[in-house]
Amino acid sequence: MSGPLRAFLGTEAASAGMLLAATAIALVWANSPLSESYTSLWHTPLSVQVGSAELAMDLGHWVNDGLMALFFFVIGLEVRRELSIGELTQRRRVVVPLVGGVLGMVVPALLYLALNPAGEAARGWGVVIGTDTAFLLGALALVGPACPTQLRVFLLTLTVIDDIVAVTVIGVAYSDALQPVWLAAAAGCLVLMWLLGRWGVWRGAAYVLVALALWLATLESGLHPAIAGMTAGLLMAARTPERHEVEGAASLARAFRQSPRADVGRSAQLGFQRAISVNERMLMVLHPWTSFAVVPVFALANAGVDLRGGMLGEALRSPLTWGVVVGLVLGKLVGVGLGSLLAVRLGLGRLPQGVGEGQVLGGAALSGIGFTVSLLIVGLAFESERQQDAATVGVLLAACAAVLLGWLVFWAAARFRGERTAGLPMLLSEPVDPARDHIRGRVEAPLTLVEYGDFECPFCGRATGVVRELRERFGVELRYVFRHLPLADVHPCAELAACATEAADAQGRFWEMHDVLFRHQSQLRPEDLLGYAADLGLDVEAFARALDDESVARRVREDVASAEASGARGTPTFFVQGIRHTAPHDTETLARALEGARTSV
């Protein structure tokens, strides 16, 4: 799992506690002697005026139409990042959660409409299509299996699909009368934001100004601003840092170290910003704010239902309430769970490694926690306060029922199917074989460091220096093994480069070619590889024939298969004494891991 995705998941799960606290405060406040102050607070008018132009809304609408647009903007950023350089770049992994996600919206909506087929209540079918990512991950941490990393990524993919469709539904089904002029202005802002990316504009301020204009145009057009937030986030491209940008930033940092002046420091700061995509920079800044401030404030503003005066009894007798509960709890379990398993049975894809069928059903049950998106649509779908309250009660009941059902399904999966963990393997699937593996150092050395690497990956390039320092430090006690894991989806030349080292190995020059390729990571085209073979004194014709030989390609594929079976998903991935290293891969951290392994040898 990628580092940014791990950080994203951690923040989402941590924010669940604040979201739960905000919900509890809202309910207590709305049912206390101070309930009038709760209602009046969110109806407090707030306006922004520049000259004769004025934008006025009450505080509740500023939260729902303003802060929630920021929330969906962050969701859009994360979706684009994962599609460009993250977990969703491997499209075959998306098919099963895509089928589950789509059916996980269709089935709940149909169940809701079965209980509320006509009238004003029928407008609430959108309430049951969404899933709250923060609550879902928080509940998974409480009632899910141990080490649920793979299951969390699978469920995150589902919620990505939920969010995209939910925002589309909000924009199409729950928007006001549309204003063509403002719609045209919003479209112009989207085109301008796309052009900023195409022109390579890297300063975030330009995107922020266009995003604000887009939000205002969308608000005035009659569309819900959530669609502006999501679309703007999706248009902000993410990319891995270019090697020359990283080296340039490092050079500027060294210059600042030698001459610590303000202007040099500013140049170094701008160099680092330029190396990192504006998508990732904005995500790093905004995601904690949306998770720990925006979403809890939204819950505080929308979860406060006054249950006194017979309201709770009325809600429990309402088909609208039970339509929400049945749609979210049963609909998500059937749609997401059975839809995902059906996709696997039909051969459309497979479940993530380490995730069992019972755990998929448990995750499907937890996806019945609609909350944030559901409460947002409640306010858009119903004008009647009674219907809003009944739907809100349904959302809260469904969240509780989904957690209980999820716990029960996870318990049954562990008890009867032995599905107690849902993480990646930690052990090297194929032990080091001196007859096959590429080894630097004494074959019989007591310490073993295995790296799965990609010749086009800049992080692997930097890791070569780390490995060199480790070999100098541990000397004859350490043997270093390199295995191939070309990430072809993001590094188009990596697979051919891996084959080049194997073709060189046929002439006994694997490590020489290995070192040359890492020194020239940006020049790995076929003509470059032939040039390196000539520089190394290889038989170029024999090298070229080997480069096209199926046995060479098969050797690389075998390494990739062993990487997947060992839990390696990115590069570089290290194994210390056959155990996957999950900490940072700098020299000191890896040295401590090797020292710890040495004491146990």
Image: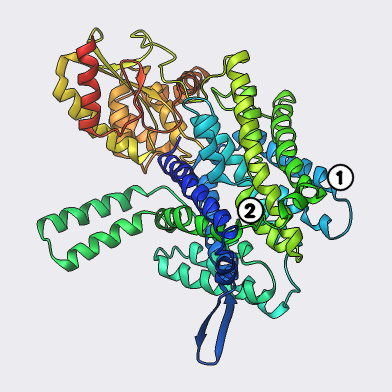
**x, y (%) of residue 522?**
36, 44
Q: Nearer the viewer, residue 351 or 89?
A: 351
**x, y (%) of residue 555?**
47, 18
Q: Badge 2 local density, few (<14 within 10 Å), some, or many (20+)?
A: many
Say which amino acid is labelled 2: Val
Q: Write down the residue under mark 1.
A: 114
Which quarter of the figure is the C terminus placed in? Answer: top left
- Taking 491 as reference, is 29 above or below it? below
Q: Nearer the viewer, residue 250 or 298?
A: 298
Secondary element at tag 1: helix
Task: Tell me what residue is drawn at x 54 percent, y 37 percent.
Answer: 139
Say which amino acid is labelled 1: Ala
Q: Are marks 2 and 1 in contact (CB under 8 Å)?
A: no
Numbered circle sitting on residue 373: 2
Q: Residue 544 falls in which quadrant of the image?
A: top left
> Is residue 233 visible to us here?
no
- Taking 157 as reference, is 311 above or below it? below
**x, y (%) of residue 153?**
53, 36
